């Protein structure tokens, strides 16, 4: 009887909580949606004296993420990491430059994480914005990270908290080596590779960095830092050598007043004072409000479908694998990517393609299949260009090599034309450390090849190495054909070596420095389209409820919106406290149910 009582009580409690949760959440969502629709009707969503607010925090991604937290995570306060879209930010900055109601940009530096090429693209958009004659102010409360400072240094005025710091230190690569650890636990990584510079497998083979890897790493780090340093120095009116000297002095330990004196920043102020400075620049009274506009409001929204002639911009982001999963920011899935490219090839409205590659590589098989799909696309008489992002290395270069024109940023990491394979062997661990012996019965000589408890024989290793060599020969052949050069000339700059974008241009791995826009323009010319030809991003991103909510929030910055969201959070806190008080009862309910 008592168990039945607990079952009824807990069932009622949980049911009421869930019903109340749904009612409150649905009510607020409906209110937000209505508010968003009302705001859409108001064509003056961006008012006079507006300022584009760039809050640099979280991580920088290529496109909007489609990851949505579960309802249970939402109710428990677990939210996904905040991401900013490179395409969205660049679009918002360009719109701000031409929108008469937007008078400037306010950069708030809070530690944005991203790779140099994405930062280069974003900084270039900010630099172009200044040609409009509008202002850019930047502020750091705790301090400028190196990436933040690289972006914010384009500002007309840079401000920092009197207790803030600037963390400029240059670039470094720290590589862990596991050979000794693996030996200690009895695991051997059996490595097969082609390419002296193919360094991804070095941590399993060596105790420290090889001379070849040190050479390539010093080169591309030096090149990338040179681009960043020279840009910062030019914006701050300094000589590059003088900036390097300041960086070498461990600038992060310097007081804010010293940073002002060294012209690293322009002035110090507290966070509550920065708005006053912006109001002064806008010519507003102290009691006036600044209309801070979020990037999502200004960013040009991608059409969900295009029925007219257009250029397909296909995003190939992440590691390459052989799966048929849905394409997203989480990887380049070979089967799905091939299917998408084939569909675009058969689509008469698609007149050309820009492949936006941001990938460190992956499956050699999948890379070959994607390469073939691009060749079939070109065989339809449609031009293809590649725009390289942060990385287009190894398999990322493989799928790029057949393009009619390859664009990269100066700080893009590319090349790494090489192949490797790794087969772990735990025979020592099993037999001598754990005391486990394996007996194998087989029908043929090499049936047991690849077992993790048995080392490869000389014959097996030789056979696998031959397969790796053949893969490398095919890889370099594809690159040679795509670049219109001899295979031997490709092998000279291949060997698995990594190159920065500037050097890749000089040695012929890329054709031109530039981003997606440059690639689109080239494809438009080749396809006989106007310079302002329509584009469509693929794979298409369907708005989920969280993205729509974020968009509504960006489009309605009224106090009512903040109050409603605050009510939702307060309700979440109340719910969590209530559930904590009743956790024993709920646990008993779970046991009865089982």
Image: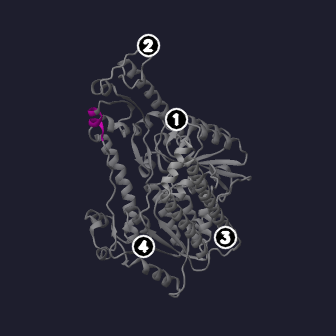
First in sequence, mark 1 or 4: give its number: 4
Q: In which quarter of the image is residue 110?
A: bottom left
| Disc 3 element | helix
Structural distance between the alpha carbons of marks 1 and 3: 54 Å
Q: Mark 3 points at which residue?
A: 35
Q: Are marks 2 and 3 in contact (CB under 8 Å)?
A: no
Question: Which sits in the foreground, 548 or 410?
Answer: 548
Q: Mark 2 points at which residue?
A: 442
Residue at position x 59%, y 68% in the image:
554
Q: Name the residue under label 4.
A: 139
Q: How crowded is mark 1: few (under 14 residues within 10 Å), some or many (20 or more)?
A: many
Instruction: Please check the rendered image and state whether residue 178 is part of the magenta-colored stretch, yes or no.
Output: yes
> What segment carries the magenta color?
177-184
Q: Residue 332, image x and y in percent?
A: 54, 43
First in sequence, mark 1 or 3: give its number: 3
Is residue 97 visible in the rendered structure shown here?
A: no
Q: Mark 1 points at which residue?
A: 478
């Amino acid at each position: 009887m008592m168990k039945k009582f607990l079952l009824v009580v807990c069932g009622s409690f949980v049911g009421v909580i869930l019903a109340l949760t749904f009612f409150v959440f649905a009510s607020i969502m409906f209110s937000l949606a209505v508010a968003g629709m009302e705001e859409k009707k108001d064509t003056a969503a961006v008012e006079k004296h507006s300022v584009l607010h760039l809050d640099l925090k979280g991580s920088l991604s290529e496109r909007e993420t489609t990851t949505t937290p579960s309802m249970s995570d939402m109710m428990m306060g677990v939210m996904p990491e905040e991401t900013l879209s490179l395409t969205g930010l660049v679009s918002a900055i360009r719109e701000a430059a031409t929108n008469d109601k937007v008078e400037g940009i306010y950069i708030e530096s809070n530690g944005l994480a991203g790779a140099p090429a994405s930062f280069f693209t974003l900084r270039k958009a900010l630099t172009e914005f200044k040609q409009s004659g509008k202002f850019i102010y930047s502020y750091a409360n705790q301090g400028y990270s190196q990436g933040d400072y690289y972006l914010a240094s384009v500002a007309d005025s840079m401000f920092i908290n009197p207790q803030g710091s600037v963390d400029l230190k240059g670039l470094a690569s720290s590589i862990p080596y596991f050979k000794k650890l693996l030996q200690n636990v009895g695991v051997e990584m059996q490595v097969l590779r082609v390419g002296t510079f193919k360094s991804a497998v070095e941590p399993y083979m060596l105790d420290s960095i090889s001379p070849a890897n040190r050479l390539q790493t010093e080169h591309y780090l030096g090149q990338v830092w040179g681009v960043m340093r020279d840009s910062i120095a030019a914006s701050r009116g300094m000589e590059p050598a003088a900036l390097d000297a300041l960086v070498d002095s461990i600038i992060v330990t310097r007081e804010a007043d010293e940073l002002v004196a060294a012209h690293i920043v322009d002035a110090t102020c507290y966070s509550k004072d920065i708005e006053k400075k912006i109001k002064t620049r806008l010519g507003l009274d102290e009691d006036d409000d600044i209309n801070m506009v979020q990037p999502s409001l200004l960013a040009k929204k991608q059409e969900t479908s295009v029925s007219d002639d257009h250029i397909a911009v296909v995003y190939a982001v992440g590691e390459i694998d052989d799966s048929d999963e849905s394409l997203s920011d989480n990887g380049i899935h070979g089967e799905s990517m091939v299917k998408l490219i084939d569909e675009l090839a058969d689509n008469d409205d698609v007149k050309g393609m820009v492949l936006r590659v941001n990938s460190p590589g992956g499956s050699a098989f999948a890379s070959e299949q994607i390469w073939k799909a691009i060749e079939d696309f070109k065989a339809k008489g449609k031009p293809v260009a590649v725009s390289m992002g942060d990385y287009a290395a190894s398999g990322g270069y493989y799928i790029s090599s057949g393009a009619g024109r390859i664009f990269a940023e100066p700080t893009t990491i590319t090349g790494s034309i090489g192949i490797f394979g790794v087969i772990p062997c735990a025979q020592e661990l099993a037999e001598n450390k754990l005391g486990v012996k394996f007996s194998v019965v087989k029908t043929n000589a090499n049936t047991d090849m690849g077992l993790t408890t048995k080392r490869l024989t000389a014959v097996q290793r030789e056979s696998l190495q031959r397969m790796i060599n053949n893969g490398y020969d095919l890889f370099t052949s594809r690159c040679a054909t795509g670049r219109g050069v001899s295979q031997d000339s490709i092998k000279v700059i291949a060997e698995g070596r990594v190159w920065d974008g500037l050097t890749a241009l000089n040695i012929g791995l890329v054709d031109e420095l530039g981003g997606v826009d440059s690639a689109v323009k080239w494809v438009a010319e080749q396809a006989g389209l106007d310079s302002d030809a329509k584009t469509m991003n693929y794979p298409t991103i369907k708005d989920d409820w969280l993205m729509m909510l974020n968009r509504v929030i960006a489009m309605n910055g009224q106090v009512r919106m903040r109050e409603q969201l605050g009510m939702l959070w307060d309700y979440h806190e109340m719910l969590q406290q209530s559930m904590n008080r009743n956790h024993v009862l709920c646990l008993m309910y779970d046991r009865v149910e089982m």
